[in-house]
Amino acid sequence: MVVPQQSTPSSLTPLSGSLMPHHRPLPIDFAAVYCDRMAELGFSEKPAAEWDDKAPSFSAKILQPSPYADAFIARMHLRPGDTLLDVGCGPGTLALRLAPKVQRLYGLDYSSGMLRCLESNAQAAGLVNITPIHLSKEDSWHNVPVCDIVVSSRSGLDRDLAALFAKLSAHARRSVYFTILADGHFNPPQISRLLGQERSPYPSYIYALNILYQMGYDPILSYITTPGRLADCTQLPDFLQRMAAAYGTLTPEHTQLLTQFFQRHHSQFAEAPFAMKWALLSWDTEAAA
């Protein structure tokens, strides 16, 4: 059952009794520069309904092997009695794998469709220690339990990263694990250039790293490289359909260019040139400066 919560905007203040780290000055205010850049890019969260529509297809892959999830979990330090908050949990990509390793897991997401899939998947797996929470990152988390561990996996795009980090840290007694795209590109830049639609990247992990440093944390950085979005794309019609979804209606010229591109490069779609590289940042909240 989804836990009812308030949905009023949060002030993002720390929880009562939590210790805030000391701010460290740098010549550049990375938190402010990040916010300005996201505003320039016109960033906004996708409507929850869009994720609701995607939930069944995401959930259908939940039992497939996930090198990303395996690599993420391998770098975590867990204890059997831990409680864990999974922010942006989706249908349970990490939650279903982590729940057997902890005492209690809370899966937070603003998509009710994703949470329904999480509940269904947990039931099918016989997991009884997962509690879904229907909230967004921007909502008040006043009633969200403080846990030993907080994870935020591939859900790190935000208007204000420093505010998000403060919120994640305030709900973690011990550690936070957070991933963000290393280079800021979701679509292969080589295809964007080919179509004359090269897009400015989102701020890279360097911003996140420096924001955490300025907030007084000492983040540990590692990388997770996974096959890209085209790794399973082996047929031209499927490729063109995905490109239309990513770039809009394709002109005849675009279709010709993409067809030639597919014929030259599709054998490499599962290899390094088209891989996705994630930066995994982890930090201890109990040992902050």
Image (tube, rainbow, N blue to C red):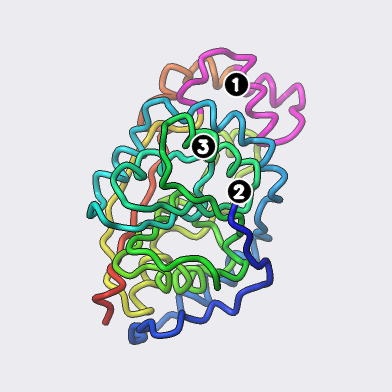
The residue labelled by disc 2 is 199
Asked whether, in this view, residue 269 is left or right of residue 37, the answer is left
**Residue at disc 3, secondary structure:** loop
Give amino acid for label 2.
Arg
Residue found at x 57% / y 71%: 35
- Any part of residue 123 in sight: yes
Is residue 142 a member of the stretch shown in magenta? no
228 or 99, nearer to the observer: 99
Where's residue 76, x and y in %? Answer: 26, 52
The residue labelled by disc 1 is 239
**Residue at disc 1, secondary structure:** helix
Counting other residues with Cα less than 10 Å from the Cα at mark 3, is it few (<14), some (14-19), or many (20 or more)? some
Residue 188 is tagged as 3
Disc 3/disc 1 C-alpha distance (Å): 13 Å
Mark closest to the chain's N terminus, 2 or 1: 2
Q: Nearer the viewer, mark 2 or mark 1?
A: 1
Residue found at x 54% / y 19%: 262
Tally of numbered discs: 3
Where's residue 100, x and y in %? Answer: 32, 42
**Residue at disc 2, secondary structure:** loop
Residue found at x 52% / y 52%: 88
Is residue 244 a member of the stretch shown in magenta? yes
Residue 39 drawn above or below residue 71: below
Counting other residues with Cα less than 10 Å from the Cα at mark 2, is it few (<14), some (14-19), or many (20 or more)? few
57 or 182, nearer to the observer: 57
Give amino acid for label 1.
Phe
Where's residue 197, x and y in %? Answer: 65, 42
Asked whether, in this view, residue 71 is left or right of residue 233, the answer is left
What is the span of residues highlighted in magenta in the rendered image?
A: 230-259
246 or 125, nearer to the observer: 125
